[in-house]
Image: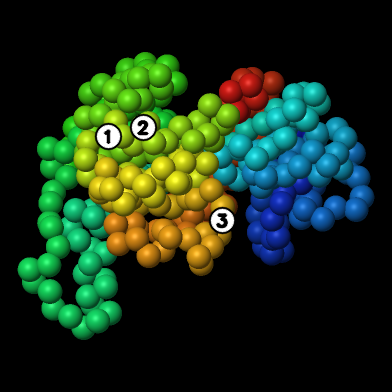
Amino acid sequence: MRRIDKGDADMIAIMREMSREMRQYYEALFSDQLLSIDKHLTVFYPEVEILISESNVTSEFLMHFPNLKLIFTLSAGVNKMPFDYLKANQVILTNSRGLHAEHMSEHALAMILAQTRQINLAVKNQLRHHWAHNEGEFTTVHDKTLCVVGAGTIGHALARKAIAMGMQVTGVSRTGRQQENYQTMYPTDKLIEAVATADVVVLLLPLTPKTYHLFDHHIFSAMKKGTTLINLSRGGTVDEVALIDALNNGQVGFAGLDVFKDEPLGSESVFWEMPNVLITPHVAGDISDYLDRALNIFANVLADFRNGTEVRNRVDLDLGY
């Protein structure tokens, strides 16, 4: 990890418990004044200017840091942050964008291949000790079209890997500006055109007022019959009632879902019993050395902040990402 000039080190608060060894390690990297906190604060910390934060804190929580200048979230998604408070108090918000690209793109591919190579069926049959040589419809991703909706850093890694597997890749972004690894890019207002030709659609969108229930009955009906849908973004980007209908009528042939509107997913949810659904419990972004990876990104953010240069990974508080 990069060692940066601490200078007159600011006090940094971090929302993580740390062992003594971890504290010493990160103090040597970032600041001699590193404060471990949780969400249950009873005192104020006027000396804290930088907060390494979870992604769902409230304005009431942030009021405990009256001189706060910079927040770094330990996630890429920031839709639960109090944007109005941050604007009013001129707090710079940054995130862990870029951390998840490789392993989340692998998660998306794993879900796709679980369907095309019938891995779900194999697991079920193994539990039953059942040798089923002629069951399941085996297909390939080769020559299939993948549409990445939310063509950011994760999408870029997914597109690169999909091309290596022989897929045709299109993408959807806010601007529709052409990017490397995408044969065609569409702006968000051309979403129907983008999904209409796709065999597989992967959602990697931030959740904002504009993307809430972006995938609804109208979008699902525009897809090819039997399209595969993978959602690794936020549950709120999908109208779940519309998705259930699309899964039942075969418009969506298979869905790999890592995120849901309400989490944890309730035991009564119909998604659990649907044979054409693969569920993972919001773990696509998980990796064993997550904190080290995130704080490696924070090191660059902190260096920019202390140098007075443009801060990397800064969130646009108006756009919400």
- Nearer to us of marks 3 and 1 is 1
Q: CA distance from mark 3 to mark 1?
A: 27 Å
Nearer to us in this view, 7 or 68: 68
Which residue is identified by label 3? Answer: 263
Residue shown at 65% from the left, 40% from the top? 80
Q: What's under tag 3, amino acid-wise?
A: Glu
Name the N-terminal-most of marks 3 and 1. Answer: 1
Residue 93 is left or right of residue 167, and the answer is: right
Instruction: Report helix, strand or loop for mark 3.
Output: loop
Q: Residues within 10 Å of mark 1 (few under 14, many from 20)?
A: many
Total labels drawn: 3
Which residue is identified by label 2? Answer: 219
The answer to whether residue 101 is above or below residue 312 is below
Quadrant of the image for the N terminus? top right
Which residue is identified by label 1? Answer: 223
Residue 98 is left or right of residue 115, and the answer is: right
- Give the image location of residue 291, x and y in percent: 57, 52
Residue shown at 25% from the left, 57% from the top? 114
